[in-house]
Each structure stands twice: as structure tokens, then as C-alpha cells.
Image (tube, helix red, strand yellow):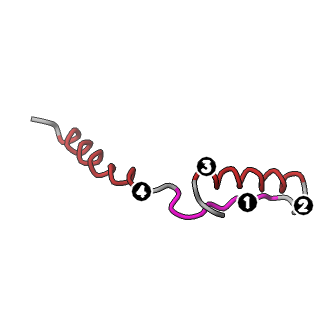
Amino acid sequence: MPTPRVLIAAILCASSNSAFTQDYPARAARMVVPWTAEGTADLMARIASQKFSESFGQCL
């Protein structure tokens, strides 16, 4: 007979399967750049966020 720990682990694993069926991310992600606009950091963040949105298949 399985111990209670094994049963609890089996229940948790079975119930966590529904989390994998959801689309990630469910909403648009926000990127915060702590520097002023029109600088090098802003430009790089805009390029990176465009690539991220293309790879996740979502518009910003």
C-alpha cells in the first residue's frame, strides 16, 4: 500500500497537468527600461521586445 506522501505527490502531479495546457503568456508582457527614451538602452529594449513578441506570437 502506498504511503500518504506518495499519494499526495501523485495527486499533485495529476492536478498540475492542466497548467501545461494553458497558452503562455496569457497576456502581453511588459518590459521596463529604467533609462531615458531615445537612448541606446531604449533602442535595444525596443528591438528585443519586438523579437520576443514575434517568438511568443503576441502583439505588444
Residue 20 in the image, given as x and y percentages of width and height: 39, 50
Nearer the observer: mark 4 or 1; the answer is 4
Between marks 1 and 2 in the image, the one whose residue lies nearer the viewer: 2
Location of mark 3 (residue): 55
Q: Give left or right: position of 2 versus 37.
A: left
Q: Which of marks 4 and 1 is nearer the N terminus?
A: 4
Q: Earlier in the sequence, mark 2 or mark 3?
A: 2
The span picked out in magenta is 25-34
Residue kind at label 2, given as amino acid type? Glu
Residue identifier under label 2: 38
Amino acid type of the residue that numbered disc 3 sits on in the rendered structure? Ser
Q: Residue 22 location in percent, x, y?
A: 41, 56
Q: How far, Cα to Cα, is label 4 from label 1?
A: 25 Å
Name which residue lies at 71% across and 55% down: 50
The residue where tag 1 is placed is 32
Dot placed on the residue nearer the N-terminal end, 1 or 2: 1
